[in-house]
Image (cartoon, rainbow, N blue to C red):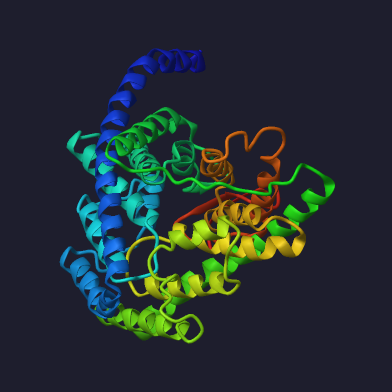
Amino acid sequence: MDDWKKQLHEHLQAPALFFKWLFFACTVGLTVGTVSAAFYHAFQLATNTRLAHPWLMLLLPAAGAAIALLYRLCGLEQDPGTNCVLAAVQEDAPLLVRLAPLVFVSTILTHLVGGSSGREGAILQIGGGLSAGISRWSRLRDPKDRQIITMCGMSAAFSALFGTPLAAAAFAMEVENVGLLRYAAIVPCVLSSVLGLWTAQQLGVPGTAFSLAGIPDLSLCAIVQTLILGVLFALLAVVFCRAMHLAFHLYQKYLPDPVLRGAAGGLLVIGLTLAVWLWAPFTFDYNGAGAAVIHAAVGGDARPEAFILKILFTAVTLGAGFKGGEIVPTFFTGAVFGCTAAPLLGLSPSFGAGLGIVSLFCGVTNCPFTSLLLAVELFSGDSPGLFTGHSLLLFALPIAVSYMLSGYHSLYSQQTIVYSKFRLDLVNKKAD
């Protein structure tokens, strides 16, 4: 009888909850979409300015110290990065509204002077900070409501910046607890993601899309080839995660003062850039996000050593306290490695680059469902009819292998592995 009453109560509440989340998803989507568009245009301006004036890279040490001082002044000297957003979703941990403008300015400064980082870490924190502000101003008392609003902010921000609304909504529902999808948040996450994308498009933000060539037909040979690539991407994901964490711990151990750490990291990035010039004079491929290199790799052109250099540049930059994120560098690394390795197995370098983007993303984030949707949204827009027949299966295989064989490594130490990747067991452990 009690169960029956509980079910009836939930059914009667459903319409009210639906309209409640329509309101909040619209508010978050429009707000975060607008700020994300501003971030995109500022990001592009900073990147173009640096490319036009390479001497700005000499300001890397000063910028690193300035970012550390800025965070210290705002009371966030021990900045947990994207982990703080995951903690807000998992545990209703407090998320400061001032995080949004702080990471906005710091990321733009990082790219202006040529630090190697992405933009998704910043935009997830911006989306989380803004949604936390909306939650606070609305005086929501239920911690679960606050958690869902934070997920809405993540969805809207990711979608607005990358133009991948389905992957954005799935990422917000999947990334915190590996092995679980929080379907209770599906309506607000999808709606805020769609509205974030629409708002960004109205404000001139283009989507991210790639045109792949040489996708093979489904065959036993193609299955074996993509499975082998999946194993290689899994190993690369472990290397990528370990490099990011090792750089952070080495900086913490030998340069405990954040200001000195930022300055030293800037000097190291300058040194690495000059070292690259020994065999490729005046090359700046590893500074900034590296979007041009990703497009070149998808087009079938990549330097074999580029993937390891990008890992090194990114680890040195982010470990020192510069801001941004690891996902676009992940795309860079996966695309270049896939472009290089695929021809060795008899596959198209363009196809290999596409596999590398989504498979390495899966290996470092532990989000296979998101990765599959990312493949559809990144690659089908510029290649109509790409996923007719069974082509998508050749993306699903290396994604699945990369997810399993990358083990419990992750870019996000706050991420919780709920279910084992190897057995039908609960493990409930933090990622490595």
Q: Residue at x 63, y 60 (%)?
A: 338
The image shows residue 90, relative to residue 267, as above or below, that is above
Q: Is residue 42 visible?
A: yes
Q: Residue at x 15, y 67 (%)?
A: 73
Outermost residue on the left side: it is: 73
Q: Residue at x 43, y 76 (%)?
A: 283
**Where on the picture, by quarter, is residue 404?**
bottom right
Q: In front: 383, or 31? A: 383
The image shows residue 132, relative to residue 28, as above or below, that is below
Position of residue 35 measured from the top left corner of the image (x, y, whole percent):
24, 44
Left or right relative to 270: residue 260: left
How many labels were placed on the picture?
A: 0
Q: Is residue 258 visible?
A: no
Position of residue 98 measured from the top left corner of the image (x, y, whole percent):
20, 53
The image shows residue 141, relative to residue 132, as above or below, that is above
Q: In front: 381, or 92? A: 381
Q: In front: 43, or 320? A: 43
Position of residue 340 measured from the top left corner of the image (x, y, whole percent):
64, 65
Q: Residue at x 39, y 35 (%)?
A: 193
Left or right relative to 376: residue 200: left
**Where on the picture, by quarter, is residue 251?**
bottom left
Position of residue 263 measured from the top left corner of the image (x, y, whole percent):
28, 81
